[in-house]
Image (cartoon, rainbow, N blue to C red):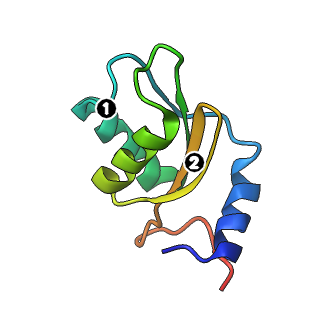
């Protein structure tokens, strides 16, 4: 569980990021979840874009993705959301205490 200070720090890091994963009309498929899992392992902080032709909202998709990838929800703005999952083997982001 992220503390408010940590969430704020991650939001500041996520601001300049471009979305690495795009979710369209297919929704959450196994291949998309595998791609997200790989991105979270290598980058720790991932911005995801939900395309307009998707049938679900960004917040609904974000909650499902968090459950299935064991990641933390950082923020959702419009049709984009940001996820964080610490890489225990090679951490890249040092969170404030």
Q: In this view, does 3 lie above or below 68?
A: below
Label 2, on which residue? 82
Marks 1 & 2, CB-CB < 8 Å contact: no
Q: For this view, does 7 lie left or right of residue 84?
A: right
* Foreground of the two, 96 or 49: 49
| Above or below 82: residue 1 | below
Q: Quadrant of the C terminus?
A: bottom right
User: Which residue: 57% across, 42% down?
Assistant: 81
Tell me what residue is drawn at x 76 percent, y 57 percent: 12
SS state under label 2: strand
Q: Return the x and y of residue 95 as percentages of the image width and height.
A: 64, 75
* Drawn side of residue 91 relative to residue 96, left or right: left
Residue farthest to the left, as pictured:
30
Closer-to-camera residue (37/60): 60
Q: What element carries label 1?
A: loop
The quadrant in which residue 92 appears is bottom right
Residue 84 visible in the snapshot = yes
- Give how far apart the Cα atoms at labels 1 and 2 are: 16 Å
Query: Of marks 1 and 2, which one's residue comes earlier in the chain?
Result: 1
């Amino acid at each position: 569980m992220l503390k408010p200070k940590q969430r704020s720090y991650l939001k500041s890091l996520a601001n300049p990021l471009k979305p690495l994963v795009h979710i369209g009309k297919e929704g959450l498929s196994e291949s998309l979840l595998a791609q997200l899992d790989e991105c979270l392992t290598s980058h720790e902080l991932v911005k995801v874009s939900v395309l307009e032709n998707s049938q679900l909202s960004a917040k609904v998709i974000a909650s499902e993705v968090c459950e299935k990838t064991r990641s933390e929800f950082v923020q959702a703005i419009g049709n984009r959301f940001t996820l964080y999952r610490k890489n225990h083997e090679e951490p890249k982001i040092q969170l404030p205490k």
